[in-house]
Image (spheres, rainbow, N blue to C red):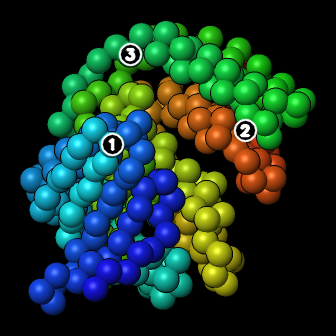
Amino acid sequence: MRLDIQGHSGCDIAIVNEDNELHIHKSTHDPAYVPRLINQANKQITASKREYQNIRVPKIFEVEQSESDATIKMEYIYSKNFVEYFENAGFEQIKYLIGAIKYFIDLEINASTMQTVPSHILTDKMADVARKVSKNIHLKDDEEALKLVKRSQEIMDGVGDMEMPVGTCHGDLTFSNILFNGNNYYLIDFLDSFIESPLLDIVKIRQDTAYLWSTLMYHKPFDKVRLSIVSEKIDKAIDEYFTTQYQWYRKYYMPLQLMNFLRILQYGHDEKVIAYLKRVISGQLATLNNSKND
């Protein structure tokens, strides 16, 4: 039996029953995407071999690859998504999740090394974003979006070389890529990042806790007030913890969060999502400018 389901990555995703055991088959028929999917699989395989407290990574059983196709066969996890989990989770469960997230990212930090990330990594990425926005048919005539990109380039030009841990990160650590099974949390959809730093995972989780990004992709009814309260509690705990612990977080979180949303904007096509992204980016620019003037 095979049940096809909708994915967000552009890959085909299916739940397959093989000898009364369920597996996930994730595949692509786009030759250009094959190397990326294989890299994601390798990253997940490496992560699944590590031991994390209450964090799990689904096992990958097979990887099939040709020049034009790739398929990953992985473990199926019985779980809830983040909305289902948060609507019923109590205070202790949320506290447990916060601890697991902090523990996971600290393990990533310990597995990384402090390195100097040259300034051109950020400015080159910003230039690439600017090019893609200018070619995006939904954005190229949007004066507000173009002004935001120009102002962002000025911010990125001033960041300079960055001292931060580099070596290990999930790459897309959002709520939509966490499966909730009791007090065990399964991470899926590992992704290559333009800087392989745990800081990018903090950026990604706060993309949801501070900005509620994944709720835009959730189309069923849910208690928005409760989810906002839960997300704010998680966000405050994460921000306070890493602010206290790490100088590189205090210094580089905001410009990298701005870059994160700019990289989403470059592919924008839905009017509602574009409006949301412009509001977020405008607010981030205001925060960065205020902090520069203090």
Disc 3 marks which amino acid? Val
The image shows residue 169 at horizontal and vertical percentages of 31, 41
Q: Nearer the viewer, mark 2 or mark 1?
A: 1
Question: Could you say where residue 17 lies in the image, as x and y percent from the top left?
Answer: 23, 83
Which quadrant of the figure has residue 93?
A: bottom left
> Is residue 145 left or right of 160 when viewed as pictured?
right
Residue kind at label 1, given as amino acid type: Ser
Q: Which residue carries the number 2 mark? A: 281
Q: Earlier in the sequence, mark 2 or mark 1?
A: 1
Above or below: residue 249 compared with residue 18: above
Q: Residue at x 20, y 70 (%)?
A: 75
Judge by depth and name the residue closer to the eye, 181 or 271.
271
Q: Which mark is residue 117?
A: 3
- How far is mark 3 from mark 2, CA to CA? 23 Å
Give whichever of discs 1 and 3 has the lower sequence position: 1
Task: Using the numbered discs, state the Cα–Cα distance from disc 2 to disc 1 in whole angstroms.
Answer: 37 Å
SS category of the residue bearing label 1: loop
Q: Is residue 215 left or right of residue 289?
A: left
The quadrant of the image that shows the N terminus is bottom left
Please tell me which residue is depicted at 30% across the width and 28% down the height of the picture: 165
Q: Which mark, by number, is residue 48?
A: none
Horizontal arrangement in the rendering, residue 84 relative to residue 42 (left or right): right
Q: Nearer the viewer, residue 152 or 158?
A: 152
Label 1 to label 3: alpha-carbon separation = 34 Å
Image coordinates of residue 23 in percent, x first then y, are: 22, 74
Please report whichever mark, 3 or 2, sits nearer to the chain's N-terminal start: 3
Residue, disc 1: 68
